[in-house]
Image (cartoon, rainbow, N blue to C red):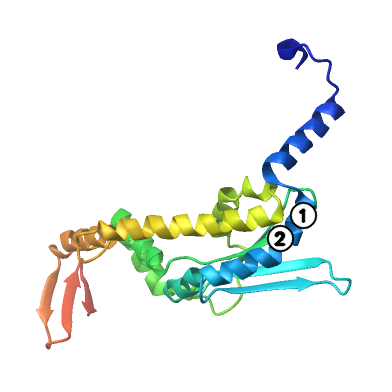
């Protein structure tokens, strides 16, 4: 500051000036909590089917707020039966913890298995023979968290890194905008898809077709076929 503007400014004075500027741009963090009830009410009005909840302490102070948009609720049926719950520290004036529950699209599992098969079909065969429950958390019959990473949560944390600096009401708005953008981008991608399936699954079918050209298929009935490939026989 001294070199560029000729101001003799201490670190503490610069820090206070920054806080004042952020308050002018983002709003008062304290008053932001008072706006939560109004925001949640308007959220349910503009997003029918959404679930919100605002909890207070005995003294009437803010405790926590819960938000589940209707679009996320509807999308749950197309996700793997695995929910990743993760907490991120808020960096605004009053700190706190931002909890998120994330899920994985069901189709991604088949996509990556197809990728494994493309690289080395022996790996996919081995994984299939030992059973998905031995290595996939979605198919596991017990809680296996010690050796599993939560990449979904880490990706979400990265996307919300800047928003966690905002006052609480602005934070909620940014989370809604993030989900809206994701839904819009996916809808736009689907709108311009002119194949029967999405591009990902069309690619999988094309790869499988190339592999299938080297297989011998004998019909056993209208619904059962015997497939022979590399000395192994399968009934499909």
Image: 14 above or below 228: above
Kindly give the residue lying farthest to the right in the view shown: 59
Tell me the SS state at disc 2.
loop
Q: Which quadrant does the N terminus fall into? A: top right
Residue drawn at (41%, 69%) of the image = 106
Residue drawn at (17%, 85%) of the image = 224
Residue 37 in view of the camera: yes
Tell me how many marks there are: 2
Q: Nearer the viewer, residue 184 or 110?
A: 184
Residues marked 1 and 2 touching at CB (< 8 Å): yes
Kindly give the residue lying farthest to the bottom in the view shown: 221
> In the image, residue 59 lies at what x, y percent?
89, 71
Image: 1 above or below 95: above
Residue 175 found in image quarter: bottom right
Residue 31 got which mark? 1
Q: On the image, numbered disc 2 is attached to which residue?
A: 35
Residue drawn at (52%, 55%) of the image = 178
> In the image, residue 92 lies at what x, y percent?
74, 48
> In the image, residue 65 lies at what x, y percent?
70, 68
Residue 112 got which mark? none
Image: 101 above or below 119: below
Gap in Å between the C-alphas at discs 1 and 2? 7 Å
Q: Nearer the viewer, residue 86 or 90?
A: 90
Q: Nearer the viewer, residue 198 or 222?
A: 198
Residue 95 in view of the camera: no
């Amino acid at each position: 500051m001294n070199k560029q503007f000729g101001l003799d400014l201490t670190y503490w004075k610069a820090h206070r000036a920054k806080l004042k500027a952020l308050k002018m741009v983002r709003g008062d963090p304290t008053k932001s909590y008072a706006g939560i009830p109004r925001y949640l009410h308007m959220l349910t009005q503009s997003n029918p089917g959404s679930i919100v909840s605002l909890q207070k302490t005995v003294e009437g102070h803010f405790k926590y707020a819960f938000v589940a948009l209707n679009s996320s609720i509807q999308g749950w049926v197309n996700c793997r039966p695995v929910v990743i719950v993760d907490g991120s520290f808020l960096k605004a004036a009053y700190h706190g913890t931002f909890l998120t529950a994330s899920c994985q699209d069901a189709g991604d599992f088949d996509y990556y298995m197809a990728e494994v098969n493309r690289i080395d079909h022996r790996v996919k065969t081995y994984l299939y023979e030992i059973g998905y429950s031995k290595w996939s958390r979605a198919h596991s019959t017990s809680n296996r968290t010690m050796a599993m990473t939560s990449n979904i949560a880490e990706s979400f944390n990265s996307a919300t890194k800047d928003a966690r600096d905002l006052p609480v009401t602005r934070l909620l708005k940014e989370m809604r905008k993030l989900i809206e953008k994701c839904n819009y981008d996916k809808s736009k991608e689907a709108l311009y898809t002119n194949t029967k399936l999405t591009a990902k699954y069309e690619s999988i079918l094309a790869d499988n077709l190339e592999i299938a050209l080297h297989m011998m298929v004998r019909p056993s009935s209208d619904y059962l076929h015997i497939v022979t490939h590399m000395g192994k026989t399968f009934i499909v």
